[in-house]
């Protein structure tokens, strides 16, 4: 119930933040796809805790174990099961939160819905659940790269009030990974890091915006009406913890333009492919990819668990206060970059298989 995503390229994640482990089962990955296991681990390393001074100090190596679905590094077409064991568990850090709900966290709503919850570390509401998504997304990335040369790359565009001016065409993975905040503008990155550290020292947190670009996407992905590509992308990234907003192409800025300014004029093409003079549509028109780059942005709220004392209630509804303990990110964005990439890749891989199934018989 709510732990699976996708139709033909389908994933199911499992595990809690302070349980024995977390992971994913991928069902529907095509057979005979050579997988670079190092790329899967590399994406998990970008997501793991304790990687820098601006992330949670929880120490987890997050080494992935592949339990099924591969033979000599090649997919069998059967379910691929991957697991990461939890090693650095400290349930005691959450004893106070077992009786006091964290403001803006999932504690209260989970309790109201289920009448029970794994409160240690947030259980399934913890960002640790995204390990399975990132591992599966790394497989989807390799499928997209092998079939269409598609690249999915994301970066931090804004932290709190500090926003980088980025030319998406020039962004590379090396530039994104060149600093701990994952902003490809080095000067702005330093100011972002300073802001995160300053807010963290106050026991507080901050949010921001991640931008994602899909280069060389397949044409024709997405379905009319309910399964529009941008609709599925929105659901995918908005299912990530702490997300509060989604834009694609011109986004909300496009509402300030007239139709004559916003429309993407079609250009003649020697190879018969669709080409447009501008890309306000963000690579998607009528819910279907047109082959231009897909560009989207995701807003992340400030981390809910903070050390500052806050007003809240306990499980009986009585007023109390809470100054959270434990190990938490003062800003989730640097570790959320591979999460956004993963969810975008999973949507594209699923729609690629759906396109092949429906439209490639003749």
Image (tube, rainbow, N blue to C red):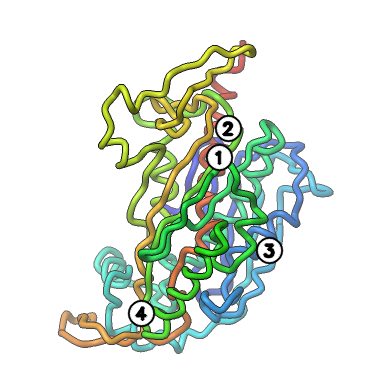
Looking at marks 4 and 1 on the same chain, the residue that comes earlier in the sequence is marked by: 4
The residue shown at (81%, 47%) is: 71
Q: Among all residues in the image, which is located at the extreme right?
A: 72
Nearest the camera: 316 or 191? 191
Alpha carbon separation for disc pair 1 and 3: 26 Å
Asked whether disc 2 touches disc 3, contact meaning CB atoms under 8 Å apart, the reply is no
**Is residue 241 at all visible to an observer of this figure?**
no
Looking at marks 4 and 2 on the same chain, the residue that comes earlier in the sequence is marked by: 4
Mark 1: which secondary structure?
strand
The residue shown at (34%, 72%) is: 304
**Is residue 71 at all visible to an observer of this figure?**
yes
Mark 2: which secondary structure?
loop
The residue shown at (63%, 12%) is: 270
Q: Is residue 76 left or right of residue 355?
A: right
Alpha carbon separation for disc pair 4 and 2: 39 Å
Mark 4: which secondary structure?
loop
Alpha carbon separation for disc pair 2 and 3: 28 Å
| Circle 4 residue | 204
Alpha carbon separation for disc pair 4 and 3: 32 Å
| Circle 2 residue | 217
| Circle 3 residue | 64
Residue 221 percent location from the top left of the image: 51, 28
């Amino acid at each position: 119930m709510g732990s699976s995503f996708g139709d033909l390229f389908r994933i199911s994640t499992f595990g809690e933040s302070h349980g024995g482990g977390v992971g994913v089962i991928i069902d529907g990955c095509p057979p005979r796809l050579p997988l670079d296991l190092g790329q899967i681990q590399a994406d998990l390393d970008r997501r793991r805790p304790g990687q820098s001074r601006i992330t949670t100090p929880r120490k987890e190596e997050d080494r992935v174990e592949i339990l099924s679905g591969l033979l000599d590094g090649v997919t069998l077409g059967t379910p691929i099961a991957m697991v990461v064991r939890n090693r650095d568990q400290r349930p005691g850090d959450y004893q106070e939160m077992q009786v006091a709900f964290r403001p803006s966290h999932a504690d209260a709503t989970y309790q109201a819905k289920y009448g029970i919850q794994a409160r240690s570390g947030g259980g399934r509401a913890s960002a640790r659940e995204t390990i399975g998504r990132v591992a599966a997304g790394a497989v989807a990335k390799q499928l997209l790269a092998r079939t269409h040369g598609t690249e999915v790359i994301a970066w931090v565009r804004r932290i709190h009030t500090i926003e980088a001016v980025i030319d998406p065409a020039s962004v590379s993975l090396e530039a994104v990974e060149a600093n701990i905040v994952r902003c490809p503008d080095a000067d702005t990155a330093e100011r972002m890091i300073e802001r995160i550290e300053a807010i963290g020292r106050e026991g507080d947190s901050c949010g921001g915006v991640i931008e994602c670009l899909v280069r060389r996407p397949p044409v024709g992905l997405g379905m009319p009406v309910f399964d529009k590509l941008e609709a599925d992308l929105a659901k995918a990234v908005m299912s990530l913890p702490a997300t509060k907003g989604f834009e694609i192409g011109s986004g909300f800025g496009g509402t300030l333009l007239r139709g004559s300014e916003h429309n993407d004029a079609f250009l003649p093409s020697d190879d018969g492919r669709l080409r447009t003079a501008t890309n306000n549509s963000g690579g998607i028109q009528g819910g279907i990819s047109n082959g231009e780059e897909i560009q989207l942005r995701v807003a992340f709220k400030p981390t809910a668990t903070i050390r500052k004392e806050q007003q809240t209630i306990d499980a009986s509804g009585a007023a109390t206060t809470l100054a959270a303990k434990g190990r938490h990110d003062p800003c989730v964005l640097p570790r959320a970059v591979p999460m956004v990439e993963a969810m975008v890749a999973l949507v594209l891989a699923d729609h690629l298989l759906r396109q092949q199934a429906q439209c490639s018989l003749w």
